[in-house]
Every structure is written in structure tokens, then in C-alpha cells.
């Protein structure tokens, strides 16, 4: 059993390095999705995160979406040109939806049912200042190879 777990961990680390992610766990930033009508809101409406972070949208009231300003969603582009469009689909109370921001820049998004009521949000993603995470992933790989 221990061996099996070690194997799985090893494979996961290999897979994550192959994809270019560090083995370090990404930051997770919570955004609450609140309100039912014209009080609908993302809280906080603007978040600044390190590139590579996971944004966890947690719906606490109402029915909402997390939808990118992107031609795929019949809107003008409001996210980095190289970033993938996103659309959570309808979320209800108790749902959580995750978005990973892989590219630096500003991600403007909205909620489909409440866009006209101002239900919008923004993520600003920037590279971490220091290089600690890449150093760490190298260290972990070394340990495994020994
Ligand atoms: Cu909404």
C-alpha cells in the first residue's frame, strides 16, 4: 500500500513537471458569489494573484455564472489574447468552480444572468517577484532521483 501511494505521488510529480507546472501546490484564492438580483456580486470583485493561481468561486446565494469577456461568449475580448476563454455554466448555491490563470494579465469576466445589473469581476495575474517556486521544484526532483 505504501509503495502504491509512493508510486502515485511519483507519477503525479512527473506529470506536473512534464506539463511545466512546479510540483509546489498553486495558490488558491477564494471569490464568493453572492446576491440574487441587483445585489449580485463577486466578493472581492477584483483580485490580484500570482500567475498560476487557482481561483475558487464559491456560490453562497442565487444562481450565477463565471463567464469570460471573450468572443467565444459573444463579448469583446477582455482577457489576455493567449488565454483560453472560460464559462462556468449555471452555478447554484453550494457550487464551487475553479479557474486556473496561466498567463499574466487582466481577466475581465461577468455573470450571464446579471451582467446588466453590474455583476462583473476582474482578476489581475502577475508573475511572482522571486524565483522560489522553480528552485523548490528542482530540489524535489533531485530528491526523487537519488
Ligand atoms: Cu450573477
Image (cartoon, rainbow, N blue to C red):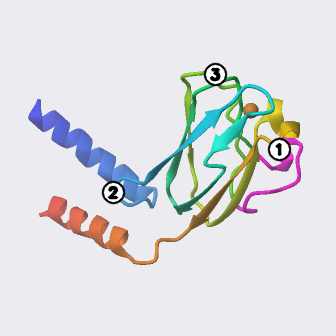
Expressed as whole percent of the image width and height from the top left, the position of residue 107 reads: 70, 56
73 magenta-colored: yes
Marks 2 and 3 close (CB-CB < 8 Å): no
Relative height, residue 121 to residue 116 (above, below):
below
Relative to 22, 42 lies left or right? right
Residue lying at 73% horizontally and 34% vertically, measured from the top left: 40
Quarter in which the N terminus is drawn: top left
Identified at 22% across, 68% down, the residue is 139
Q: Residue furthest front?
A: 39
| Neighbourhood count class around disc 1 (C-alpha, 10 Å): few under 14, some 14–19, many 20 upward | some
**What kind of element bears circle 2?**
loop
Name the residue that disc number 3 marks: 92
- The residue tagged with tag 1: helix, strand or loop? helix
Q: Residue at image x 85%, y 37%?
A: 117
Instruction: Check if mark 1's residue and mark 2's residue have beta carbons within 8 Å.
Output: no
Image disc number at residue 72: 1
Q: Earlier in the sequence, mark 3 or mark 1?
A: 1
Residue on which the image places disc 2:
23
Q: Which residues are magenta?
A: 68-82
Amino acid at each position: 500500500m505504501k509503495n502504491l501511494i509512493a508510486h502515485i505521488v511519483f507519477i503525479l510529480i512527473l506529470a506536473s513537471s512534464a506539463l511545466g507546472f512546479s510540483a509546489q501546490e498553486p495558490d488558491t484564492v477564494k471569490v464568493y458569489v453572492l446576491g440574487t438580483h441587483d445585489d449580485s456580486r463577486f466578493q472581492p470583485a477584483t483580485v490580484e494573484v500570482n500567475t498560476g493561481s487557482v481561483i475558487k468561486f464559491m456560490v453562497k446565494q442565487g444562481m450565477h455564472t463565471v463567464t469570460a469577456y471573450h468572443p467565444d461568449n459573444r463579448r469583446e475580448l477582455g482577457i489576455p489574447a493567449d488565454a483560453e476563454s472560460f464559462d462556468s455554466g449555471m452555478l447554484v448555491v453550494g457550487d464551487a468552480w475553479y479557474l486556473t490563470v496561466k498567463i499574466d494579465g487582466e481577466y475581465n469576466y461577468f455573470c450571464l444572468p446579471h451582467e446588466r445589473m453590474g455583476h462583473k469581476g476582474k482578476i489581475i495575474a502577475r508573475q511572482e517577484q522571486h524565483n522560489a517556486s522553480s528552485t523548490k521544484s528542482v530540489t524535489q526532483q533531485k530528491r526523487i532521483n537519488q
